[in-house]
Amino acid sequence: MVAAHRSCPGYVEEPFASLVAEYPGVEAYPADDFRVEWGPVFHRGRLDGSARVLVLGQDPATHEAISRRVLVGEAGQRVQGMLARLGISSSYVMLNVYLYSVFGQAAGYRHVKDTAIVDYRHRWLDAVLLDSQVTAVLALGTLAKRAYGHWASSSPEREARAGGLHLAAVRHPTYAEGSARASGQPLEDTTAAQLADWSAHLPELSAAVAPEVTPNPRPYGESWAENDLVAIPEQDLPPGVPAWWRAVDAWAVRTGADAQEKRSTIRVTVPKGARQWPTL
Ligand code: URA
């Protein structure tokens, strides 16, 4: 018998059904600063109240635009690996600061306090944090830390809830690549710095989360090791998506001869290891 497949049920219950029905578009997210043409990407993980950790990322990239869930590409697999160290295999929920992919890092900073963007983000944060089992928030990068802090100080109810949550504000999962590009430092050095930062947060974060399976909050090495990245669970993605969408090999890249073409094109390629057809 074929094993039963699991998949994300989507946005069927309130308040999530209304949240996805009422998402903001270009009136809130200007098209010169956000890739609105690829549509909003809302979340990944549990919306049934069972989440123990909230992961707050920044904005969706190519793998997320195609799979319609946040933190699916390499950044997501690094985070999934961190959750595995905490002994968390399914009881998490992930959101991004922005629904749409930021066009240029400066745009991310420009809009983090825009009222329409913030109000909608706060509705999601209320939905997953108020009256929930979440005990810890993992904020990925500066924007996520800022966005969470803004929510936490924006009403007495939110402030009281945040007071009972552990906040681990770590470097963004692709900090090393971005920082090496911007500073000219070797990628090995920025990777070691990122992993040292993640290792430093692990003990307190682990103490703040009730594990589902045996935790192993061992520190990271100076470079990524094979088991540091974990594939995205099948139950996190919409029904019927191919298994290679969840695996570590990159399969979605922006391509194009100029900026216009690149913004309009994501090339999706079946990785070699996932080609099941007979080859010559
Ligand atoms: N993908 C996301 O959805 N969020 C990030 O922060 C990075 C990649």
Image (cartoon, helix red, strand yellow):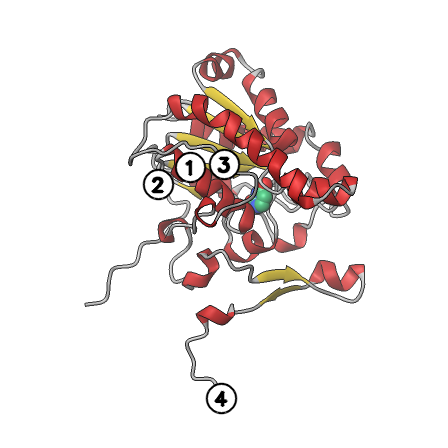
Q: Position of residue 37 (x, y in %)?
A: 66, 55
Q: Quadrant of residue 205?
A: top left
Sort mark 3 into few (<14), some (14-19) or many (20+) by Cα contacts within 10 Å.
some
Q: Quadrant of residue 155?
A: top right
Q: CA distance from mark 3 to mark 4?
A: 42 Å
Q: For this view, does 262 lie left or right of residue 39?
A: right
Q: Nearer the viewer, mark 4 or mark 2?
A: 4
Residue 89: image tag: 2
Labels 2 and 1 touching (C-beta < 8 A): yes
Residue 280: image tag: 4
Residue 83: image tag: 1
Sort mark 4 into few (<14), some (14-19) or many (20+) by Cα contacts within 10 Å.
few
The residue sitting at the bottom extreme is: 280
The answer as to whether callout 1 falls within 8 Å of ligand 1 is no
Q: CA distance from mark 2 to mark 1?
A: 7 Å
The amino acid type found where label 4 is placed reads Leu
For the residue labelled by badge 4, is the local secondary structure a helix, a strand or a loop? Answer: loop
The answer as to whether callout 4 falls within 8 Å of ligand 1 is no
Residue placed most toward the observer, 51 or 198? 198
Mark earlier in primary sequence (1, 4): 1
Q: Nearer the viewer, mark 3 or mark 4?
A: 3
Mark earlier in primary sequence (2, 1): 1
Q: Position of residue 73 (x, y in %)?
A: 54, 51
